[in-house]
Image: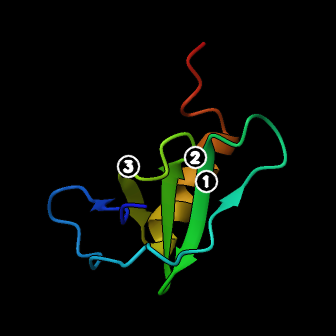
Amino acid sequence: MAESTTERPAGDTAPELDLGNAAWLSSSQGAGEVQIAFVEGFIAMRNGRNPDGPALVFTPGDWRAFVRGAREGEFDLT
């Protein structure tokens, strides 16, 4: 299995993380396509259908803002 890479926005200060041994979690709802892992104080998110693909890395503050926005419908397409 190839080691996952991380992708971060320009100017982000999150370190390169070794996600090769990360414990990935899937939601109990839906198809489990989105997976997250808690690694070295950061939160990584990847597409469970493509586990060897890139992962997004969030700081705890950015993760809270993302979850809050999702709960409030900020990313709804309808």
Q: Tell me the quarter of the image containing the C terminus.
A: top right
The percent coordinates of residue 35 (x first, y second) are 61, 53
Q: Dot 3 lies on which element?
A: loop
Q: Earlier in the sequence, mark 3 or mark 2?
A: 2
Looking at this view, name the residue that lies furthest to the left.
11
Residue type at tag 3? Gly
Gap in Å between the C-alphas at discs 2 and 1? Answer: 6 Å
Q: Residue at (55%, 18%) from the top-left corner? A: 77
Residue named by callout 1: 35
The mark lying in front, picked from 1 and 3, is 3
Residue named by callout 2: 48
Residue named by callout 3: 53
The mark lying in front, picked from 2 and 1, is 2
Residue type at tag 1? Gln
Q: How many marks?
A: 3
Badge 1 crowding class, 10 Å Cα cut-off, few under 14, some 14 to 19, many 20 or more, is: some
Tell whether label 1 touches label 2 (CB within 8 Å). Answer: yes
Q: Residue at (54%, 31%) from the top-left corner? A: 75
Residue type at tag 2? Gly
Q: Dot 1 lies on which element?
A: strand
